[in-house]
Image (cartoon, grey):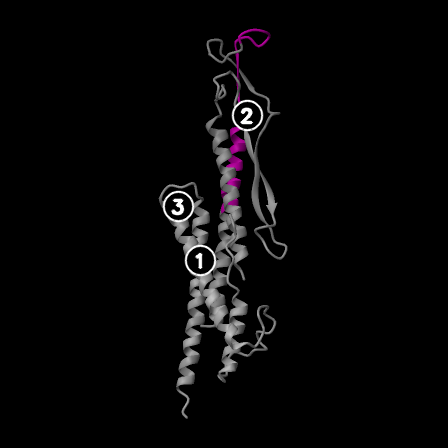
Amino acid sequence: MIMPAFDISTSGLVAQRVRMNTISSNLANISTTSNEAGEAEPYKPRYAVFQTDDGIGRNGAAGVNVSSVQTDEEVQPRWKYQPGHPDAVKEGERKGWVAYPGINMMTEFTDALEAARAYEANLGAMDITKDLQQQTLRILA
Amino acid sequence: MQPISGINMSSALQNLSQMQSASGVSGLNGNGLGAASGAGAADASSFKNILLDSIQEVNSMQQDAAAAVEGLATGEDVNPAEVMTAVQKADIAFRMMMQIRNKLVQAYTQIENIRV
């Protein structure tokens, strides 16, 4: 039966949607200088990590699922000199500087486009699967 | 998403051909479908069970689809893609069942038209 192809494509759609959510999150927080508790800590970009899922496919084919959404701990903040800012560094070498998230808008948008194209590709595969299923009915009709 | 198990079309077709050969109606060739996997026992009563099973599976697929649509409409945290997939699968499975039913009715009318 062709149905597993449907489930695999759906898992791709779901995964790309999760990825798109993380990209939206990164773009929304591109100027976020404090964390949930209100402390001065720049937002760290998040990335969805995909893994294969053999439970969805059949005959060697595998679906995909999102194993986790990781925060990028290595990213360097962008420093801006804003002495009046409430999240500015109070003392030391960086006094008066504010740490902004090290998010590159250009790469985020490229990722967003890629996610959208991958979503479309999954829809295309699904369309073909659907077509095949309907064609198969012609054996009996 | 949990995959919804599909009904096995090849075995359904095979059983259809078995039923036809059992009732003496020519048409589908059993050998032509021999490569298809599935219950191959020439048991007339099992065909009914398999047909009922597949109808039941189509029914459960439709119930899954209805539940998914309801979840989407009532604002639950469901992915639209999964809802659409459930609906599409239910639709395909139902159409397949209808084709099998049409074939059955066709076989029945052929037998009915035999002059004795």
Residue type for callout 2: Lys
Q: Which label sits on residue B60?
A: 1
Q: Is residue A35 above or below residue A113?
A: above
Farthest-out residue, top: A91
Task: Please give the range of residues in magenta.
Answer: A90-119
Residue type for callout 3: Gly
Left or right: A5, with B114 as reference point = right
Q: Which label sits on residue A44?
A: 2
Residue identifier under label 3: B71
Q: Quadrant of residue B31?
A: bottom right
Left or right: A8, with A60 as reference point = left
Q: Is mark 3 on a helix, strand or loop?
A: helix
Task: Report the front residue among B105 and A96.
Answer: B105
Q: Mark 3 lies on which chain?
A: B
Mark 2 vs 3: CB contact within 8 A:
no
Residue located at (49% from left, 62% from top) = A133
Q: Are marks 2 and 1 on the same chain?
A: no
